[in-house]
Amino acid sequence: MWARLVHIILGVWLMAAPEVLGYPDPARTHDRIVGPLATSMAIIAVSEVTRSVRWVNLILGLWLVLAPWVLSYDSAVLLHSTAIGVLMSACALVRGKVEQHFGGGWASLWKPGLSNGGEL
């Protein structure tokens, strides 16, 4: 749960950082796109059922690390984007506590050894 809260904080910070730090385009536009995406994915991933959505934030974090070179950021913005990307990627790797098991997909319909109406 704590990792999703860190994701939410980082996403909100990405939305505010262009104004607070005053950095120019393309980093300004980039963070205004990635911030809401990261925040939304973190809010969705708070629930145990949808926790696998956290992998989207891993991809976004890796993109934040690569974006300064692809989009030619200034050096200060490069450090900021890299730091946020590393934190976001690290938090995405945190699984979280599993308290319940949901569904089971197709495997729940067929169990090996139970082909004769449930008799072994």
Image (tube, rainbow, N blue to C red):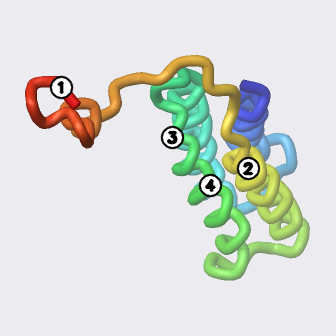
SS class, disc 2? helix
List the residue tagged with mark 4: 58
Q: Earlier in the sequence, mark 1 or mark 2?
A: 2
Is 18 in front, or is 49? 49
* Residue plotted at (90% across, 67% down): 76
Mark 3 against mark 2, which lies toward the viewer?
3
Mark 3 against mark 1, which lies toward the viewer?
1
Residue 23: image quadrant is bottom right
- Residue 35 is left or right of residue 24, and the answer is left
Q: CA distance from mark 1 to mark 2?
A: 49 Å
Picture coordinates of residue 65 (x, y %)?
A: 72, 68
* Mark 4 surroundings within 10 Å by alpha-carbon count, few (fewer than 14), some (14 through 19), many (20 or more): many
Question: Which label sits on residue 52?
Answer: 3
Residue 89: image quadrant is bottom right
Q: CA distance from mark 4 to mark 1?
A: 45 Å
List the residue tagged with mark 2: 88
Mark 1 against mark 2, which lies toward the viewer?
1
> Do the residues under discs 2 and 4 have CB atoms within 8 angstroms?
yes
- Residue 73 is left or right of residue 29, and the answer is right
Picture coordinates of residue 12 (x, y %)?
A: 70, 33
* Mark 3 surroundings within 10 Å by alpha-carbon count, few (fewer than 14), some (14 through 19), many (20 or more): some
Q: CA distance from mark 2 to mark 4?
A: 7 Å
SS class, disc 1? loop
Q: CA distance from mark 3 to mark 1?
A: 35 Å
* Residue plotted at (88% across, 74% down): 75
Q: CA distance from mark 3 to mark 2?
A: 15 Å
Mark 4 against mark 1, which lies toward the viewer?
1
* Amino acid marked by disc 1: Glu
